[in-house]
Image: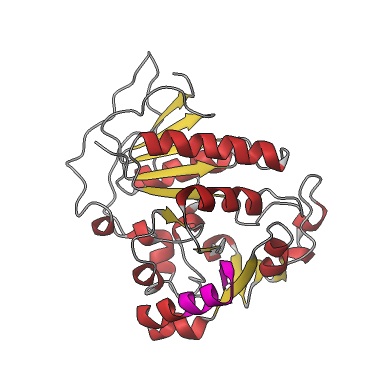
Amino acid sequence: MPVLLGAIADDFTGATDLANTLVRHGMRTVQLIGTPTRPAPEDVDAVVVALKSRTIPAADAVAQSLAALLWLQAASTRQIFFKYCSTFDSTDCGNIGPVADALMEALRTDLTVFCPAFPENGRTIYRGYLFVGDVLLSESGMRDHPLTPMRDANLVRVLERQTPHKVGLMPLQAVRRGPEEVRSEFARLRREGCRHADPRRGGRRRSHDAWGRARRLPPGHRRFRRRSRITGKFPPRRTLEAQNGRRPAASGPRASRCDIRLVLYGDLGSDRGNARNPLGLRRRSAGARRRPAGG
């Protein structure tokens, strides 16, 4: 059975948060530490590959991410998802831009969307500027981060310094007019030579319809918010059994939600209900497995 969603995460903590989020909302999920070397587990909906590539040299991050992609493709994964931090942790050398470019090239994708907004945790975007709470990212504590100091809150400028490709903005007005208008904006961005687009603000209800059946889910995109868009229905709940003597990791109300942003598109500040249950799925108590790369 093919894997429905394959996530490539640039750090362990965020990968764990994402795996917990998927499990809590109905997806049978396995987290793998490092680049996998053995065949994909059976009877799972999602696989999260946890790399430690956020602050290593860009060339190494690209190599690790492409290796993870090849493994996911060998497992016939239907959707590829690149996970990064909601504060866009990176430097002028990467690694978000170089890894995204490499994944797009490998998947033959000519346009993708970047949207790290997570209003429930104080991360919002306005006209391409990322806010942490009430202040710009560049005025927050991330300004003096020892490894990835974020001193520019404009995501277009940040991303342009990491990629040779043009970066554009998706206007909120187009998203509000519906999927057809969004498709028109995507076409415009393509004509202008853009490969990356940042949303100016908000607009999540229609954007996933406009994105179509892209093989690579863009960061921040929420097309897997509704299970029917991936599988129609998930199979009946089954408890994931421990393998190799390892017990499944429990996930529940205490599990972290700091990576729910990955399934949001734009600013959800006015829709707290969906922010609390971003996948729009019936809650189930299932287990998540974490396995080392070779295990």
Q: Is residue 211 left or right of residue 234?
A: right
Whether the magenta-drawn stretch holds residue 192 is answered as yes
Q: What stretch is highlighted in magenta?
A: 185-201
Q: In this view, does 60 lie above or below 263?
A: above
Q: Is residue 259 left or right of residue 47?
A: right
Total numbered badges shown on the rendered structure: 0
The residue furthest left is 236
Q: In this view, does 161 lie above or below 43?
A: below
- Asked whether 240 or 113 is in front, the reply is 113
Whether the magenta-drawn stretch holds residue 97 is answered as no
Q: Residue 214: x, y in percent?
A: 38, 59
Q: Residue 131: x, y in percent?
A: 66, 68
Q: Residue 217: x, y in percent?
A: 43, 56
Point 51% across, 40% down: residue: 15
- Asked whether 122 or 234 is in front, the reply is 234
Q: In this view, does 131 lie to the left or right of 44?
A: right
Point 70% across, 43% down: residue: 58
Q: Residue 101: x, y in percent?
A: 59, 53
Point 33% across, 21% down: residue: 242
Q: Is residue 285 above or below residue 122?
A: above
- Asked whether 75 or 34 is in front, the reply is 75
Q: Quadrant of the C terminus?
A: top left
Point 53% across, 77% down: residue: 191
Q: Can residue 289 be seen in this view?
A: yes
Q: Can residue 200 be seen in this view?
A: no
Q: Specify the color scheme.
A: secondary structure
Q: In this view, does 173 lie to the left or right of 145?
A: left
Q: Quadrant of the N terminus?
A: top left
